[in-house]
Amino acid sequence: MTGGLARDLAEILGPEAVLEGEAARPYQRDSTEMQGLAGRADAVALPSEVEQVRRLVAWCYERGVGIVPRGGGTGFAGGAVPVEGGVVLSLERLDRVLRFDPELWRMQVEAGVRTGRVHRLARESGLLFPPDPGAAEQSTIGGNVACNAGGPHSFKYGVTAHWVTGLEAVVAGGELIRVGGPLRKDVAGLDLRSLLIGSEGTLGVIVRIWLRLTPAPEALIPVVAAYPGVEAGVAGLGRVYGYGLVPAALEYFDPGAVAATRAAFPGGLPEATGFLVVAEADGTRQAAEALAAELAEALGEGALEVRRLGQPGEIRELWRWRSGVSFAVSAQLGGKMSEDVAVPVDRLGEAIAMVGEVGREHGLRTCSWGHAGDGNLHATFMIDASSPEQVARATAAASSLFARTLALGGTVSGEHGLGWVKREQFDRQFGPAEAALQRSIKALFDPRGLFNPGKKLPPAG
Ligand SMILES: Cc1cc2nc3c(=O)[nH]c(=O)nc-3n(C[C@H](O)[C@H](O)[C@H](O)COP(=O)(O)OP(=O)(O)OC[C@H]3O[C@@H](n4cnc5c(N)ncnc54)[C@H](O)[C@@H]3O)c2cc1C
């Protein structure tokens, strides 16, 4: 921490809004901590007003100081980690719900409002904010927008971008820009909103967001299908698509993921289970019942068991089990490296097999699970995270995984973004023309390269 810089910031924001020493430590890391990533911020700033964000950004921009926006620090790509120093600009004190119009299905929030709080507020008024990334009690709406976060219910409802109708952001020099608003349609200009969504803090600091909500479904009915192996399970998923069924969520768990979590599965699983599909029907009671029956039929062929869960307690237990999958897999060997690759849905079976092949080539145990309906895998190499040799092997395996994912027509990131840990994949995924265009856009927004330096789209070469 640079004392002089912290003193200057304290003059702009007030001393209580600048952290130093032990208090600043948690802001040097995010969920990539297990991979050993840590930064060293020159200062940590916690503004509580948009005007303070403007002054802070203007100050940094004038002096050439890097700015690392931060929400809840749950990101899996190291995006909020101040790897190259600079000022960590935490949005956590910008946490006001500015407006909530339940009868108009919309809400305006500051960027630091926690995702779980939006879920609860919406639910209390019979509404739904569908994006449901797994760490909703810690992550912020600003972080979700900056990463364009997904989650299990993206299959039917889409990712965060589908639920943002407008936002305000502080950009180069401390200018506040407003794009969109409480509008359901707007094609007046170029779509700056879409550029900012998913920009991972590299174009500016998102400070206020207009969210779209939808009436909550009356009923939820999960349908669980257990299979002896991958082939039968993937065929079941194919039938769900082919029959034209649209469950809210359509998740899969491969043999390794089943083995790591089966003991905690609500109601247990047949002994021979080697692949699991969890679908969730929602809608009016009648529509959910009808869809659940169709899902059971589509998933039934080749299954060891197909089960409907109906009681509220059971559904809560199922999703609690789902939230624990990542931790249960980590517990196998004490750590893991998980990559959120995505492929066209017709290549999902190949992608699941490919994870195992890459693991075998690198002498690593693997498993995968994820959002089957979106072709989005959590491709995982299980390691002892305290062994530098195993971390190096998993890193090499991940590199091979990315190359093979691209060969399947996929993407290196379906939902977590590139941040710092996957920045080298940028030029692998995009051809020179697309990469140059993206870098030109970055330069237009951020001519001095001060917003989240080195992240997502690193300088060419
Ligand atoms: C257990 C667990 C489960 C998860 N499950 C999912 C999942 O299902 N789907 C999914 O998509 N993700 C998931 N994630 C990843 C993570 O929760 C999401 O990426 C989330 O959107 C990050 O939000 P955050 O507020 O924690 O952002 P941070 O981690 O603080 O930041 C993430 C990135 O956004 C930028 N940023 C943050 N706030 C702003 C802002 N206001 N303006 C500009 N840039 C900003 C940061 O600079 C950084 O680049 C999971 C994480 C964990 C730990």
Image (cartoon, grey):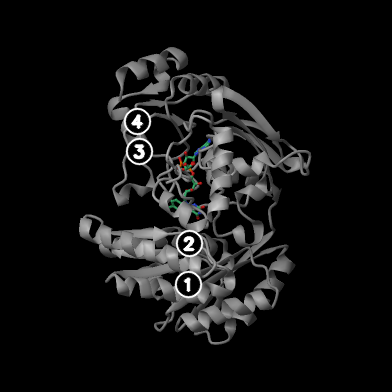
| Rendered location of residue 100, percent (x, y) | 68, 35
Rounded to the nearest angstrom, the CA distance separating label 1 from label 2 is 9 Å
> Which residue is nearer to you in this view: 361 or 328?
361
User: Where is mark 3, residue-wise?
Assistant: 83
Q: Which mark is residue 351?
A: 1
| Rendered location of residue 89, percent (x, y) | 45, 29
Q: Which mark is residue 341?
A: 2
For mark 3, give the secondary structure.
Answer: loop
- Up the image or down, 125 lies above or below 293; here it is above
| Rendered location of residue 128, percent (x, y) | 65, 50
Q: Confirm if mark 3 falls within 8 A of ligand 1.
A: no
For mark 4, give the secondary structure.
Answer: loop
> Can see residue 259?
no
Q: Residue at x 38, y 39 (%)?
A: 81
Rounded to the nearest angstrom, the CA distance separating label 2 from label 4 is 30 Å
Q: Is residue 413 left or right of residue 271?
A: right
User: Where is mark 4, residue-wise?
Assistant: 41
